[in-house]
Amino acid sequence: MNMVIVGASAGLGRALAEELAALGHRLLLVASDARDLEAVGRDLTLRYGGPVGTLAIDLQNFDADAFRGAVLARLDSVDGLFLVAGFGDEDDCGALPKGRALALTKINFVAPLLIANAFLDHLAARPRAHLVGIGSMAAIRGRSRNMVYGASKRGLEFYFEALRHRLSGAACKVQFYRVGFMATTMFKGRHGPLVAKPEQVAKSIVRRLDGREGAFTLSLPWKLISLVLRLLPYSIFRRLDV
Amino acid sequence: MADRTFHSFGFGESAQGSLEEPDRLRFFDAVHGNGPLLPRGAGVSLAGASFGPGVRALGMRHFNRVLAFDDAAGTVTVESGATLATLFGFLARKGWMIAVQPGYPGVTVGGCIAGNVHGKSQYEEGCFGDWVEELELWHPRHGRLMLSPTRESDLFALTIGGFGLTGVILSARLRLAKLKGRGVALTALPVGDIGEAATVMKEHRGRADFLYTWHDMAWSPRGRGFVFVGKLTAEGPEVPVRASFHRFDQERFTLPVGLMNRWSLSAMNCLYSSSRRSGVRQLSLWNAMFPFAAIPAYFYLYGRRGFLEHQVVIPEAAFATYIPRLRALAGRHRVPFGLAAMKLFRGPQRLLTFSGDGISLAIEAPQSSATRALFADIDLLDVALGCRANILKDARLPAAAVARQYPEHDVFRDRLTAFDPARIFRSSLSLRIGL
Ligand SMILES: Cc1cc2nc3c(=O)[nH]c(=O)nc-3n(C[C@H](O)[C@H](O)[C@H](O)COP(=O)(O)OP(=O)(O)OC[C@H]3O[C@@H](n4cnc5c(N)ncnc54)[C@H](O)[C@@H]3O)c2cc1C
Ligand SMILES: NC(=O)c1ccc[n+]([C@@H]2O[C@H](COP(=O)([O-])OP(=O)(O)OC[C@H]3O[C@@H](n4cnc5c(N)ncnc54)[C@H](OP(=O)(O)O)[C@@H]3O)[C@@H](O)[C@H]2O)c1
């Protein structure tokens, strides 16, 4: 199958690319730095054999229709679209300058929304297709940290529900994953019991590709945390330093 | 960037520093202050080579991509964080292999170049650096440089076996060896002592793909053991592109008290000798190449105090004198040796590279003040008999010993300072050996 991974040069996106390459899929890798993409692309082509293409775009500043054209010029059809790219800002606690707040909304919400839109008809018409989005545990409850990021991811989750509704009846599966901490650059290399390896998360996502549609939290501890956070009355939540 | 305590493999040397693991090439577009910095591979060196006090270690594990493969020329171009395991299955499928492979599959290409390491048969295949055709080095003041034996050859020579002190190797083009087979017929020849082992090894010189020895020096001070002679054979299992193996982790749980002492080591060695019958065994190339990957528990049994290793190249003429003197020293200090192993070495020695003509002997002992005192005496023995110790494998080798054993110690330091007057790259090892 032809799979497009947006945010494929590092972290979870790169791990997903390796999993999909190992299964023999044809890939198109998308991120902002052509040098990283080139290295990942060459590695996967050499080690797994399948053709791997690359396309460098900046999600903060791109034209979705031109992007669709560029993708379809490289792969004549798309059977899987993985919207993985994401971006956090350490100072996202309420006083973020306008440019940085906009960057967060564009990368985490607007760009994946526009890309999903641009490919909607195409995916709906395929005999079998996958649309996968990546959200975050930061979007379970509004907090004084990751404010814009969390809001953008919540928006994306909402939009994915809408996409699922829109595509019901079509052969395109829509899946959304709320991810917890992962040991990637985005998480600043921290370690701990709740921190998953991106390779593990990628494996789970690929294993579930033909499974149920919906929005999922992958590990049991995060499911419990998510449940507690949801049930907690605001009067208590307000006092928590989470 | 996370602050943490680093340990060398075996816990012989430790320091407090920080670790950063960049994963995008734009990291190397910036200058990153005045250091101190240091590249880090898998971090399994037995000396404090990939960390230092207050040093920002740059872990290269994300830069592990195979960039090019040329079947006609027999070369692979690979990023420095790629491990031997990454390359093993990929190259085997194409009928090639990395010529020089240390005994653990998790070591990185960067660590192998910067350590100029050796494999199972240094006598035949030389050191890792002999197979490097070209490399790309990053230094914050000099940017990205392409180096080869014909391009910036001095800096190329300084970087091979340069302990990461010239900068970060980003990628390298390696000459490959033809894969002669996926299996190894490993013959174990029993020997009564170390001297006999040296004679048997010399008889097989030039006729084996693997040639090394193992000795029990805990129970049998004479060093009863085996000479292993390995020949590649066509038959052997395929190794998956993504080979899995047990990873050594310095932050792992360790036994608070080591279980390795004279008695347990003797018992283990006796058990090994009696279970290890003489004769031929058929192994997969992977298992023959990486015996330590199969027995991680062996190292864990040393506990949190760990162990020290010392490896020397002994000139053949000095060998007969060296062994009895070493035995006497070990007896005097009452230190039991865990592992003792030999390989044949040859080739010119330059800068701080561990090579030269002779027989290499590696010994390992539980860490204690007695072991440190013994190893200090061994340093004097090495100097007296013209032997040279492996800097990368010894967590306590002092500057004085290095200066006396390596004639180009000063040349190395002067060239390094000329290239990088600010000496941005530093490690516990470089500070200890006076670089
Ligand atoms: C079980 C075991 C068996 C071993 N067997 C052998 C053997 O048979 N023969 C042998 O010679 N050695 C052997 N070794 C030692 C090992 O091969 C070397 O210490 C090797 O350098 C470790 O590689 P690493 O990736 O862990 O490097 P590290 O320990 O992380 O670093 C080693 C040195 O390389 C430098 N370095 C790492 N990456 C880069 C880079 N990208 N650019 C520039 N410099 C870099 C570091 O600064 C440091 O100075 C063995 C070690 C173990 C644990
Ligand atoms: N890591 C965590 O702890 C964590 C937790 C919860 C959710 N998540 C989510 O998981 C997903 C993957 O995160 P990760 O940790 O793998 O991140 P990562 O390691 O930082 O990788 C992000 C990827 O997205 C690309 N990207 C970012 N901004 C881009 C832009 N403007 N234009 C084009 N590409 C861009 C990056 O490429 P370039 O470098 O080329 O820009 C890179 O390939 C994200 O959606 C993230 O929000 C992560």
Image: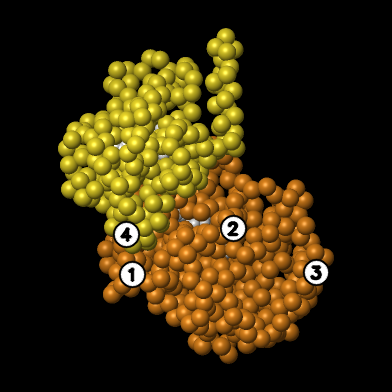
Placement of B22 over or under B88, stated as above or below: above
Residue pictured at 57% horizontal, 82% vertical:
B185
Placement of B358 over or under A9, stated as above or below: below
Between discs 2 and 3, the one toward the N terminus = 2
Left/right placement of residue B163 relative to residue B258 reads: left
Q: What residue type is labelled 4?
A: Gly
Q: Colour of chain A?
A: yellow
- Mark 1 crowd level (few <14, some 14–19, many ≥20, 10 Å Cα): many
Question: In terms of depth relative to the viewer, which is nearer, A103 or B370?
Answer: A103
Q: Name the residue under label 3.
A: B267
Which SS class for mark 1?
A: strand
Q: How far apart are marks 3 and 4 (CA)?
A: 52 Å
* Mark 3 Cβ inside 8 Å of ligand 1: no
Between discs 2 and 1, the one toward the N terminus = 1
On the image, the x and y values in percent for residue B336 come to 76, 66
- Mark 4 crowd level (few <14, some 14–19, many ≥20, 10 Å Cα): some
Residue pictured at 44% horizontal, 34% vertical:
A214
Q: Distance between the residues labelled 2 and 4?
A: 29 Å
Q: Distance between the residues labelled 2 and 3?
A: 25 Å
Q: What residue type is labelled 1?
A: Thr
Q: Do labels 2 and 4 share a chain?
A: no
Q: Name the residue under label 1.
A: B75
Left/right placement of residue B225 relative to residue B388 reads: right
Asked which colour scheme the image uses, the reply is by chain
Which SS class for mark 3?
A: helix
Give the chain of mark 4: A
- Residue mark closest to the camera, 1 vs 4: 4
Q: In which quarter of the image is the C terminus of chain A?
A: top right
- Mark 3 crowd level (few <14, some 14–19, many ≥20, 10 Å Cα): some
Q: Colour of chain B?
A: orange
